Amino acid sequence: MALARPLPLTGSIFFDARGDDRALRVSWHHDADLVVVSLWRDNVCSGSFRLAVDEVPALIDMLRRGLDAAYAVAASREDTMPLHHHHAG
């Protein structure tokens, strides 16, 4: 496990919904034609994955399809939810 290093200027950090100082870092390494995805906890890297730049579009496409499906499911739930009426009184 490596101690935290500064995030490259072309990267992002996403915090885990579970908290506990968990995060996902995504950084571009243009000189190596790579995107590095790393998992962090308490500012310590616990694992990383190197994705070749030519594979990034397939990952983005898969994430987009999943997001579209999630929105479709959420929209169908809203359509079937009963409307609640509040009466002043």
Image: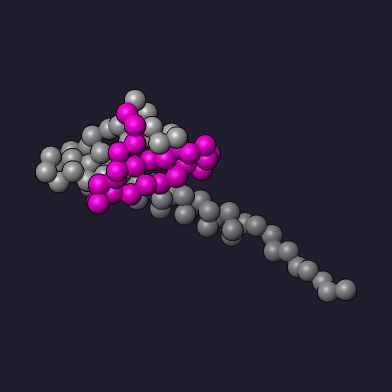
* For residue 70, above or below residue 84: above
Q: In which quarter of the image is the N terminus?
A: top left
In this rendered view, identify the residue nearer to me: 43 or 35: 43
Residue 65 position within the rendered picture, expressed as x and y whole percent measured from the top left: 36, 48
In this rendered view, identify the residue nearer to me: 43 or 46: 43
Identify the residue at image location x=30%, y=32%. 48
Q: As drawn, which residue projects farthest toward the top?
A: 1
* For residue 55, above or below residue 72: above
Q: As drawn, which residue projects farthest toward the right?
A: 89
Q: How many marks?
A: 0
Residue 9 position within the rendered picture, expressed as x and y whole percent measured from the top left: 25, 51
Q: In the visual, does 88 lie left or right of 55?
A: right
Identify the residue at image location x=34%, y=36%. 4
Residue 36 position within the rendered picture, expressed as x and y whole percent measured from the top left: 25, 39
Q: Is residue 87 magenta?
A: no
The color scheme shown is one colour
Q: In the visual, does 42 lie left or right of 83?
A: left
In this rendered view, identify the residue nearer to me: 88 or 85: 88
Identify the residue at image location x=52%, y=37%. 20
The range drawn in magenta is 2-25
Q: In the visual, does 23 lie left or right of 51?
A: right
Q: As drawn, which residue projects farthest toward the bottom?
A: 88
Q: Quadrant of residue 34?
A: top left
Residue 39 position within the rendered picture, expressed as x and y whole percent measured from the top left: 37, 35
Residue 60, visible in the rendered structure: no
Identify the residue at image location x=22%, y=41%. 35
Q: Does the magenta stretch include residue 3?
A: yes
Q: In which quarter of the image is the C terminus?
A: bottom right
Residue 81, visible in the rendered structure: yes
* For residue 81, above or below residue 45: below
